[in-house]
Amino acid sequence: MTVRRIMPDYQVESEEAMRASRDFYGLLGFQEAMDMGWIVTLASPLNPTAQISFFTEERTAPVVPDLSVEVEDVDAVYAQVVASGAEVVRELRDEEWGVRRFFVRDPNGQVVNVLTHHRS
């Protein structure tokens, strides 16, 4: 199994808080990589796998994840997670913005978004 990147996910209370976070992390060199209104992802321009995301909500799942892990083969990881008996918080599915993902709760109660980007 190959992990491509790991990024923290933060739930913020409002769009104003999201803008404040964007401005603050801009001071550290992060730039906007994606803005879908309810989620903004910032990335390092020199190392685009160094990312952080801010959510006002999660529109396609029951909770905002605490962490996102991009893997090479999300279907294989999903099969391993299900076989282990871990709590799947959101089933595996394709999203309209080009990822296939599922959510799982880790042993400490954190929700992990496990995903693969669709390759064309």
Image (spheres, grey):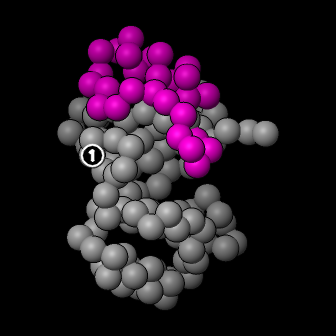
Instruction: Report the front residue among 46 and 115.
Output: 115
Residue lying farthest to the left in this orientation: 109
Within 10 Å of disc 1 (Cα), the crowding (few <14, some 14-19, many 20+) is some
For the image, the number of numbered tags is 1
Q: State whether residue 23 is above or below residue 91.
A: below
Residue interval drawn in magenta: 73-99
Instruction: Report the front residue among 104 and 50.
Output: 104
The residue carrying mark 1 is 63
Image side of residue 53 versus residue 13, left or right: right
- Type of amino acid at the residue the image marks with label 1: Val
Rendered location of residue 10, percent (x, y):
33, 62
Residue 4 appearing in the image: no
Q: Quadrant of the N terminus?
A: top right
Q: State whether residue 37 is above or below residue 111.
A: below
Quarter-wise, where is residue 55 in the image? Answer: bottom left
Q: State whether residue 64 is above or below residue 86.
A: below
Please report the residue visible at 47 percent of the width from the left and 16 percent of the height from the top.
79
